[in-house]
Image: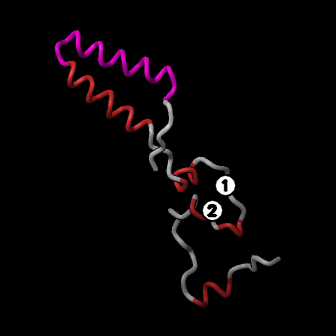
Amino acid sequence: MLVFRRPPRSLLVFLGLVVAFAALLGHALNGAGLALFLLFISSIDAKPSWRFHFDQPGDVDSGRSTMLNSWQRVGATSPEELSKLPSIRD
């Protein structure tokens, strides 16, 4: 989601330095394009689902804790093997 708010002063100074450096090399238009691209990238908010990877793990009921171990192979797959597993309610 794009958020149109005033960027921080440090970002504007950095983008100005990018344009100035490119102008010294004779590529002011390319520097301005790069600065606009960086400004566009900085205005994108993180998607809420991206926060999933950086938040604390959930409890067993939320299902988030199983995602971290989803790469492991399931040991019991047949009904007979499933019936021999210990109860999770104990």
Give how far across and how far down residue 64 sits, in percent: 62, 62
| Residue for point 71% across, 69% down | 61
Give how far across and how far down residue 32 sits, in percent: 27, 25
In this picture, residue 45 sits left or right of residue 33: right
| Residue for point 66% across, 55% down | 57
Which mark is drawn over residue 57?
1
Total numbered badges shown on the rendered structure: 2
In this picture, residue 72 sits left or right of residue 35: right
The kind of residue on which mark 2 rests is Arg
Q: Is residue 31 above or below residue 76?
A: above
Q: Quadrant of residue 25?
A: top left
Tags 1 and 2 in contact by the CB under 8 Å rule? yes
| Residue for point 32% across, 18% down | 18
The kind of residue on which mark 1 rests is Pro
Question: Label 2, on which residue?
Answer: 64
Give the SS element for disc 1. Answer: loop
Q: Using the image as rendered, state which of residue 20 and residue 85 is in the foreground.
A: 20
In this picture, residue 65 sits left or right of residue 37: right
Q: What range is drawn magenta here?
A: 7-27
Which mark is drawn over residue 40?
none
Give how far across and how far down residue 17 sits, in percent: 36, 15
Say few, some or many: other residues with alpha carbon within 10 Å of mark 2 (under 14 / 14 to 19 / 20 or more).
Answer: some
Q: Is residue 12 above or below residue 52?
A: above
